[in-house]
């Protein structure tokens, strides 16, 4: 079984309880969710769930079908990283005394295009946006310096490389089908 990282884009109506229904599909199949981000989409009253998981394509296909069976889910699609524009954000809180003693830390922060948000005598807060690997690289370098006090990373946000959101075409097709059945 060849596991790789997939990103699922799930579109649903904005109704309480949908997130629980969607995540239950993964739980039943014992697939761990690596990251999850929920937000409004470009379409009014439609929310977008960006979910990343390690799995094989056959299982991902079955998961998407199971998610689409949920009554308030409009569409579920899966993608590999090369099919998406991806972004994450991370916040690091590091010990300022260690930062001041080791100039390599600030060079690393600048080199990886991270930004110092706040510096005080106790801690320094760093903000970094980018790809998961870039954020992991900064984490590993700061961790080697034994200066991390706190760390958190957002879930992945992603848009497809196509011109339109996939859901737009799907909704147009559904509207045409419904209009045809009314004639």
Image: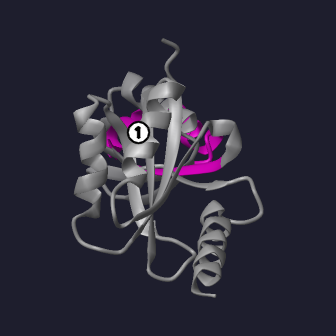
Q: Is residue 105 part of the magenta span, yes or no?
A: yes
Instruction: Give the percent coordinates (x, y) of residue 70.
Output: 33, 57
Q: Is residue 97 part of the magenta span, yes or no?
A: yes
Residue 83 lies in what quarter of the image? top right
Magenta highlight range? 85-114
| 84 over 105 or under it: above or below | below
In the orientation shown, which residue stands out farthest toward the front?
Answer: 183
Q: Nearer the viewer, residue 76 or 158?
A: 76
Which residue, given by chain and number where applicable, does mark 1 sit on?
63
Q: Look at 55% across and 33% down and name the residue there.
A: 133
Q: Look at 31% across and 52% down and name the residue there.
A: 22
Residue 182 vs residue 3: left or right?
Answer: right
* Residue 89 visible somewhere in the drawing: yes
* Residue 154 visible somewhere in the drawing: no
Instruction: Give the percent coordinates (x, y) of residue 163.
Output: 77, 63
As helix, strand or loop, the secondary structure at mark 1 comes to helix
Instruction: Give the percent coordinates (x, y) of residue 58.
Output: 50, 26
Residue 122 vs residue 81: left or right?
Answer: left
| 87 over 147 or under it: above or below | below
């Amino acid at each position: 079984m060849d596991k790789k990282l997939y990103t699922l884009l799930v579109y649903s109506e904005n109704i309480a309880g949908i997130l629980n229904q969607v995540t239950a599909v993964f739980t039943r199949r014992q697939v761990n969710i690596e990251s999850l981000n929920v937000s409004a989409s470009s379409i009014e009253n439609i929310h977008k769930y960006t979910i990343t998981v390690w799995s094989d394509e056959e299982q991902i296909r079955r998961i998407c079908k199971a998610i689409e069976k949920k009554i308030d889910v409009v569409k579920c699609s899966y993608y590999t990283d090369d099919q998406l524009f991806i972004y994450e954000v991370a916040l690091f809180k590091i010990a300022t005394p260690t930062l001041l003693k080791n100039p390599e830390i600030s060079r690393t922060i600048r080199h990886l295009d991270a930004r110092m948000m706040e510096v005080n005598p106790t801690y320094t807060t760093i903000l970094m946006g980018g790809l998961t690997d870039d954020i992991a690289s900064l984490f590993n370098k700061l961790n080697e310096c034994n200066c991390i006090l706190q760390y958190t990373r957002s879930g992945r946000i992603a848009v497809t490389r196509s011109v339109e959101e996939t859901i737009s075409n799907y909704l147009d097709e559904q509207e045409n089908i419904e209009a045809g059945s009314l004639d």
